[in-house]
Each structure stands twice: as structure tokens, then as C-alpha cells.
Amino acid sequence: MDNGMIPIREYVAANGNRCPRTVADVLLRQLPEAVARWRSEQLSPCGRLREEFIKVDAMSGYVEITAPCADEVADESDDVRDYGAIVSGLLVTAMPRRHVNHRVERFVDACRRGDYATMGDVMLAVERRKSGAVYVVLVIVVVALVALLAWLNA
């Protein structure tokens, strides 16, 4: 491939064991952004998203979609379902089983079912899941500090 771009399946297979967090970032953050960017840049209707159109820079993890325009027309809900199917297939076949998070599997299944209407909804769902864990930690720290303060004043 030119410029170090390789098919996404090769990228996941090569890095899934060594860098599962990097691969998860590519699948959950970079890929939805690339799909949204690809759709917004198209001047004429393009067909459905397929795995063979997705290339990843082997060094940086930058995702690029190079799909020829087709006669069939797909909308954003098709993109969400196709994204879910692609990521699900990659998690099953190319990613080591011990690195697959059950929450990620449920999220990908929701994409495949069409629970999200747009790629923007998918990107928000990914960020919401991550930021929710930060709030739980913050609440625990605040409760612990209040308890310590109450104990010191007693």
C-alpha cells in the first residue's frame, strides 16, 4: 500500500496482541470519525461501507476510507449498521479474545441493530461511556474527602 496504509484487518491482527488499547481507539474513535468525514466529503452518492475500503496508517493509526462511488445509495443508518458489522467481525476474527471488553461488544451489537441513527450518535455514545467512568471516580473521591472531614471534626 502507498504511504504506509494497510487494510484495517491487517492492522488489527498485527496490533491486537501488542497494543489492544490502540486498536480499540482506532475501532471506536478513529473509524467513526473517518466514516463521517468520508460521507461529508462525497459529492455524489456512494454505496455501502465495506471493510475492504478501510485503510489504516500502520504508524499513526489514522483511518482513511477509499470507496468508489456506486449505483446503490446508502444513508447514515446504513453506515451505522455497516460500522457495527465491520467492527464486530474484526473483534471476532482478528482481535485476541482476552482483549475484547464486554461493554464494547454490547455497543457494537447496538450499532448492528441500528440503535444509533447517525455516526454522530455513535461518537457521542463512545465518549459518554468513557467520561461516565471519570465521574464515578470523582464522586468516590469527593465522598471519601467529606467522610474524612467529618471524621476529623468529630
Image (cartoon, grey):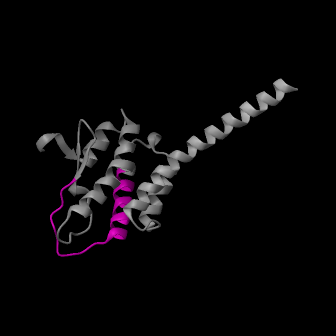
Q: Which residues are magenta?
A: 65-90
Q: Position of residue 40 (x, y in %)?
A: 25, 63
* Residue that protrudes farthest toward the left in the picture: 2
Question: Which residue occupies 46% across, 60% down?
Answer: 109
Q: Is residue 60 left or right of residue 118?
A: left
User: Quadrant of the rendered structure where residue 34 is?
Assistant: bottom left
Instruction: Name which quarter of the figure residue 144 lies in.
Output: top right
Task: Tell me if I can see residue 144 in this picture.
Answer: yes
Residue 67 in picture, x, y percent from top left: 18, 61
Q: Quadrant of the N terminus?
A: top left
59 w.r.t. 10: above or below: above
> Vertical placement of 60 versus 127: above or below?
above
Q: Residue at x 84, y 26 (%)?
A: 153
Q: Residue furthest top?
A: 152
Q: Residue at x 39, y 44 (%)?
A: 24
Residue at image coords 39%, 60%: 120
Residue 68 shown in magenta? yes
The C terminus - image quarter: top right
> x, y percentage for residue 2?
11, 43
